[in-house]
Image (cartoon, helix red, strand yellow):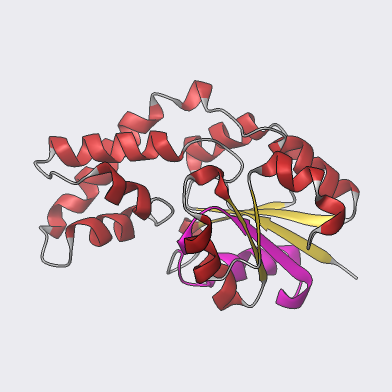
């Protein structure tokens, strides 16, 4: 029986959520928007366009969206050479690949950013494919990114597990019909992840790896 282990990347495998918070906050500030960091944090995990809409509302000047996204990308790009993988992230993916899981990444990152994230994880030989937000019409919390990951793996939803760190991840995975596992290393509270659909919660990749035998990924 083929099985798929689908992983979000930012905040799940690589410790980047707070870098995203800071650089989005600065991009918004430079454009004249005063958005509190806690609100930015809760929006991390959405694609750029959806994140801006979530923070600024539908009555914003939408002509500014592309400039905001470009500013965030430029600010965040300064960290590409030192993005820190979360502890045992690469070991977890290599173990799952060894155990016969088809490992797929589901992320809104692409291009140089995705390359930097994969360098940080350092487990390319264990990653079967990557489903990017560029490949779908709607990003998380819509189910399309997870559904696309399952298509790439050639595995039905009932044989898959999705691991993520945000409410948006849990909602996307639940809507795609997969079992959802949450991790707390992205900074989102346990109760919020459970309410959004997480069926199990771990501290980080190292905790999941240590308890792998008793997890949905056994």
Identify the residue at image location x=16%, y=67%. Answer: 58
Considering only vertical position in the picture, is 35 above or below 123?
below
In the displayed structure, 159 sits above or below 86; it is below
Residue 17, x across and y down, in percent:
44, 40
Most extreme residue toward the front, as rendered? Answer: 191
Q: Which residues are magenta?
A: 140-168
Q: Is residue 84 left or right of residue 40?
A: right
**Residue at figure coordinates x 55%, y 66% from the top left:** 194
| Number of dots carrying numbers | 0
Quarter of the picture containing the N terminus is: bottom right
Side (left or right) of 180 relative to 32: right
Residue 126 seen in the figure: no
Quarter of the C terminus within the rendering: bottom right
Name the one closer to the observer, 90 or 212.
212
- The residue positioned 55% from the left and 43% from the top of the image is 185
Residue 124 shown in magenta: no
Q: Is residue 101 left or right of residue 69?
A: right
Q: Answer yes or no: is residue 168 visible.
A: yes
Q: Give 115 or 166, whichever is nearer the viewer.
A: 166
Residue 203, position as x, y percentages in the image = 63, 45
Residue 157: x percent and y percent? Answer: 71, 75
Which residue shows up at 47% across the image and 27% down it?
Answer: 80
Q: Is residue 9 left or right of residue 160?
A: left
């Amino acid at each position: 029986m083929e099985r798929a282990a689908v992983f979000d990347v930012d905040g799940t495998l690589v410790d980047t959520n707070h870098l995203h918070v800071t650089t989005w906050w600065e991009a918004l500030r430079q454009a004249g928007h005063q958005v509190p960091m806690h609100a930015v944090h809760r929006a991390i995990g959405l694609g750029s366009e959806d994140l801006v809409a979530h923070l600024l509302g539908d009555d914003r000047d939408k002509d500014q969206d592309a400039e905001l996204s470009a500013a965030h990308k430029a600010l965040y790009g300064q960290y590409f050479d030192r993005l820190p993988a979360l502890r045992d992230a690469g070991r977890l993916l290599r173990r799952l690949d060894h155990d016969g899981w088809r490992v797929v990444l589901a992320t809104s990152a692409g291009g140089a950013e995705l390359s930097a994230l994969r360098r940080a994880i350092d487990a390319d030989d264990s990653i079967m494919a990557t489903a990017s937000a560029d490949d779908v019409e709607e990003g998380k919390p819509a189910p399309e990114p997870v559904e696309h990951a399952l298509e790439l793996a050639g595995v039905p939803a009932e044989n898959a597990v999705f691991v993520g760190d945000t409410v948006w991840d849990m909602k996307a995975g639940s809507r795609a019909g997969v079992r959802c596992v949450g991790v707390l290393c992205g900074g989102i509270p346990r109760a919020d992840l459970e309410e959004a659909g997480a069926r199990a919660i771990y501290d980080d990749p190292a905790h999941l790896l240590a308890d792998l035998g008793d997890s949905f990924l056994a």
